[in-house]
Amino acid sequence: MASVGKEINNLVRSAIAGDLDSFGELARRYYPAMVSIAYAIGRDHHAAEDAAQEAIGRALVSLAKLRRPERFGPWLCRICRNVAYDMYNGKPQTASTPDTIAPEPSEKDDNLLTAVNAALDCLPKASRELVILKYYTDLSYEQISAVLGLSPAAINGRLTRAKRKLADCLRRNGFAEMRL
Amino acid sequence: MTSNKEQEQLDKLLRATLAKEPITLDFQAWKSAHPEQIAAYRRPRRRLPTRPLQFAMAACLIIAAGFVLQWMQLPEQVHIAIEPANPAAMINRLQLTIAYANGGIEGLEKQYDKAYAKLGPRAGVVTVNSLFNTF
């Protein structure tokens, strides 16, 4: 974990010094997290990818302004969040249809997936972002920690609370037995 | 509080609802699609001074401002002297001591000149005592 952080710091310093390949490597590593963050705001995968790519451009241009290379991840994701909010004019969207890779769900499953999406919309912004970071791109706690600038223990606590709220919301909507 | 089984079910449900195929960035394609950003990144930049350098520059500026203010100080602020109302008071012991302290012999002479200028032209027959008594 510490060596990964050191490696990222070195890449950030090289990128600030003018090495575009180092920046490319950083962009590749953080791209899934950026797409997840934008998806949490817009709930549209293609728009989320557009926002992430736009954010990479903005970050590249203003990289020289980054004072603390060790905060690169949170800095990059803040840019992505801002780009996504600009894109949706600050209004979070709701996912009308499930954007999944599940193969042809039955009507019952479809109802459940729609209910999960609706329950996600009930969560506070930060909690929704965390859940999507975890399950949309299957990031580890360490990766989420690098992106949000929080400790893995804090991530675990917040994620547990967010999932509890989700479960409560699903139960209230009549999904007492959460079976796939 | 949800049980472990429920937690597992919720995990599965969230993965089924949200999970995407691995998301990857083709940086070469991104580079060719964003030439303006690449050009802006490669453009020589004016490096901003580091934080310690900024503090040093601010300190130099404050010291320089101090010197300028000291140099610009008005004479009244340097030489504190209360101008007496009449020529007799202008040449009493205290005023002459102050004049000497501020300007030496020249200061003393200046003080006398000012006192006599204030006294103005008088007839020769009038005594100095009677002249001073008029004020």
Image (tube, coloured by chain):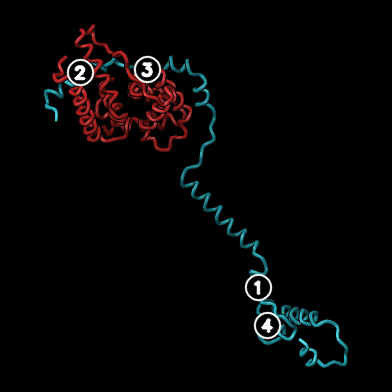
Q: What amino acid type should be assigned to the residue bearing mark 3? A: Leu
Q: Cβ–Cβ below 8 Å for labels 1 and 4? A: no
Chain A: what color?
Answer: red
Residue occupying the point 53% across, 32% down: B45
Disc on the earlier residue, 3 or 4? 3
Marker disc for residue B13: 2
Q: CA distance from mark 1 to mark 4?
A: 13 Å
Q: Secondary structure at mark 1?
A: loop
Where in the figure is residue A63, as x and y percent of width and height? 45, 31
Quick one: quadrant of the C terminus of chain B? bottom right
Where in the figure is residue A103, as x and y percent of width and height? 23, 7
Q: What amino acid type should be assigned to the residue bearing mark 2? A: Leu
Q: Are marks 3 and 2 on the same chain?
A: yes
Where in the figure is residue A4, as x and y percent of width and height? 29, 30
Chain designation of label 2: B
Q: What amino acid type should be assigned to the residue bearing mark 4? A: Gln
Marker disc for residue B25: 3
Q: Residues within 10 Å of mark 4 (few under 14, many from 20)?
A: some
Marker disc for residue A4: none
Q: Are marks 1 and 4 on the same chain?
A: yes
Q: Secondary structure at mark 2?
A: helix
Disc on the earlier residue, 1 or 3? 3
Of residue B74 and residue A160, the one placed in the foreground of this image is A160
Q: Residues within 10 Å of mark 2 (few under 14, many from 20)?
A: many
